[in-house]
Image: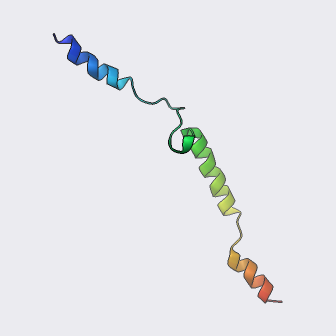
Amino acid sequence: MILPPMILPMCLAACGSAPDDPGLGGVTPDQAQELNEAAAMLDANSVSINAVANQDTAR
């Protein structure tokens, strides 16, 4: 009689997602981290639109 109540929590604990299961957006956590790093790298190398506009008016 004690066995069935003990089995339910064990079964529910086994239902968690694996680390490589796609999450939001259909990407794995590792892929999401790589995308965030790439976006940060692009942001660091970007040029301000004001800097481009100021060059044209300085002539």
Question: Which residue is at a point 62% across and 48% down the rendered structure image?
Answer: 35
Image quarter (top left, top right, bottom left or bottom right) of the C terminus:
bottom right
Q: How is the image coloured?
A: rainbow
Q: In the rendered image of this protein, does residue 3 appear above or below residue 34?
A: above
Q: Is residue 56 left or right of 6 when viewed as pictured?
A: right
Q: Nearer the viewer, residue 56 or 45?
A: 56
Question: Which residue is at a point 60% across and 41% down the rendered structure image?
Answer: 31
Q: Position of residue 21 (x, y in %)?
A: 52, 32
Q: Position of residue 24 (x, y in %)?
A: 50, 44
Q: Position of residue 4 (x, y in %)?
A: 22, 14
Q: In the rendered image of this protein, does residue 58 appear above or below residue 39?
A: below
Residue extending farthest to the front is 25
Q: Nearer the viewer, residue 37 or 20?
A: 20
Question: Which residue is at a point 41% across and 29% down the rendered structure image?
Answer: 16
Q: How many marks?
A: 0
Residue extending farthest to the right is 59
Question: Which residue is at a point 62% across and 45% down the rendered structure image?
Answer: 34
User: In which quadrant of the rendered view does residue 40 lie?
Assistant: bottom right
Q: Is residue 23 left or right of 3 when viewed as pictured?
A: right
User: In which quadrant of the rendered view does residue 32 lie?
Assistant: top right
Image quarter (top left, top right, bottom left or bottom right) of the N terminus:
top left
